[in-house]
Image (tube, helix red, strand yellow):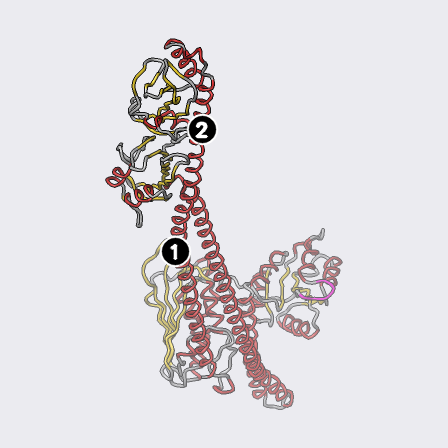
Amino acid sequence: MKPAFQKNGGASRQRKGTALTFILIVVVLVVLVFSTGWFMSSSQRATETSVYNVSEFYLKELSAQTGRQMQISLNNEVQNLEAAIHALKGEDLLDKPALREYLLDMAGLYNFDFYAIVDEDGMVYTADSAFSGLSKLDFLSEADFKEPHISINQDLGAENMVIVAVPIRDMEFQGKPLVGGVVGINASTVSSKVSLKNDEDQIFSNVILKDGSYLVKTPHVHLKDNSNVYEALEKQADFQKGDSAQKMQQDVQAGRSGISSYYLEGILHYTYYAPAEGTDWYLTTTIHYGTVSTNVETVRFTITKNSMIQLAVVLLVVFGVLVIYFWQRRRNEILHLEKMQAEEGSRAKSRFLSNMSHDIRTPMNAIIGFTDLAIQHEFDADTSRIHEYLLKIRIASRHLLSLINDVLDMSRIESGKMQLDIVPCNLPEALEGMRSIVQGQVQEREQSLQMDASNIENENIYCDKLRLNQVLLNLLGNAIKFTPPGGSITVTAVQKGGICNGWGSYEFRVKDNGMGMTQEFAKKVFEPFERERTSTVSGIQGTGLGMAITKNIIDLMGGSIRVETALDIGTEFIINVGFKIQDGSLEECEGQKQGCRQEVDFTGRRVLLVEDNELNREIAMEILQQYGFEVGAAEDGAEAVEIIQNAQPGAYDLVLMDVQMPIMDGYTATREIRKMDSAYASIPIIAMTANAFEEDKRDALECGMDGHISKPVDVPVLLRVLADILK
């Protein structure tokens, strides 16, 4: 229970670690999202504040610049007017025509819109007329009019006119002293000179009086025409908190500067108002939010964009770290699992070697023991005892060979070298052949064996007959071993469904009422080196490889195998696999059924036996000579090539060639013989070797051999192959 506890504890810790990691990820993402949202909201508020502050600063500077520009323009007009007055001579005052010529000259010279001189009675003299204008220019009669004066007059033309006046001293016209020269400048001219409106209709500058009336009025695309700025804003503007038309009016009347923010037609405006230096006027400069905010918004957008990029980068980094973390974690889990599997495999192989040591020593002990007994009784008169010993030696030897074959088959499976050899086969006959093989064991254990293939419609198929027999015999052998005396075993073969594209689906069931398996072991019954109870416990021998080999063969055939079992009740293995259906009879297969499954006289036949092992060479020579062969021998491939090359015609009928030999191996020797320029170049050569895999058979044929016999030599198989070659 301890390993399971550790495994469950590790899984619990892993789940807790994953949950904590997930919670941490969520917290990080929430913090990132909320911090980014707060940053963007804070950025928006900071942008609005910045726009307001920048707008105030910008408008203040623009208003000051406009005021200075307007002051410069007006000062220029004063200087021009003073220059015109300075140019006034006595001859210009002789009569009205002389005065008119002077006025025209000065108006043209200095580009005056309106130019006149005024006497002490308020008579105004212009180039076109003379009129009494003292009521309109009453400041000229004031005693303190000694410096240039600038004012507004709405009665001198079609629009407001800026009046610039300078005093005149010690000059008379028509007996009346002159008090001043006056220049009138149209408001539109002032506006153009001081650039009170930009081309994009984004900035609007006006000159107003303290009562809110316009001195210079710039058309506003959002503010409808009105004669009073306070009244217009009161009706149309939606002021921001803390601002109003009344506050603006109070500031102006008190001589204070200020800024108001309000919406016109859904567009935010800022209006800065400040007194114009040297006058009683106020300059108002209005700007759209977008004009200032464009650059600020660009900065904010850049900051926001960079923040989003930074957030994305952070998220990517977090994601990358998480990917690396989980990849590394998964890699560690895989490495840990592989380590556990390797350790378990190592333990399984250690158990396997321990079991194999016992299982191999058991038949070896029987072979050695009965051999010693046979030697001791070789001169006894009772030969039946020696015959019994020899039979038991053969049984033990075959069991030892089966153990070795299982290990070799598993090695081939693990290396991926096992391949199928597809040949014609008759299923009922194959089952009947298996019955004859196991019948002796069944009878010895007093068991009942039933085989049923009656539900097979298409009996003739193509398959690897040897491997199919191996699978079914393995299952059947296990059923016999693990079923107590008196038990029953059934083998059922059923064809399921019809034929599809020339293929049929078959199901094989091998069932017994033996000891069965635990459900825990049933889950790993197809794993290599696994045995629920070793031979030292159960008394039943085996490598623990048979079911793994069976499973791999079925997988190689494209089928499936499963087990249903219950402890002390029994076990049933179910195989489902598809086979190619034969179109005709089994004549081709029947043609291969030639046994020795025949009387052949080998007397006088000559065989060259190529074998490097002296004991194996002696055994093979005894067997061959027993059946009439005359045998020549070679100890390696090079000697065999030399013997064949120097042999007289008819000296040898065939060659039995070992493969693994010193100096020259059997494959190379065969190739050398096939290259000879003699009749022996085509002599039959049969591989007789312990290299017993299918690929070894193919290698033998590819190098030029005519057949293959695996060691240990099965005498009936040897005689059948020799008969086929020499017939």
Q: Which residue is at the front of the view, 321 or 675?
A: 321
N-terminal-most mark, 1 or 2: 1
Q: Is residue 616 left or right of residue 511?
A: right
Quarter of image, res 140:
top left
Question: 278 and 497: which one is in front?
Answer: 278
Q: Which residue is mark 2?
A: 75
Residue 556, above or below 143: below
Looking at the image, which residue is at 62% across and 85% down? 368
- Quick one: label 2, few (<14), some, or many (20+) residues within 10 Å? some
Q: Residues within 10 Å of mark 1 (few under 14, many from 20)?
A: few
To which residue does mark 1 refer? Answer: 37
Mark 1 vs mark 2, foreground winner is: 2
- List x then y, in percent, for residue 617: 68, 71
- Which quarter of the picture shows residue 146? top left
State which quadrant residue 227 falls in. top left
The correct choice, above or below, for 702 with respect to 153 in the image is below
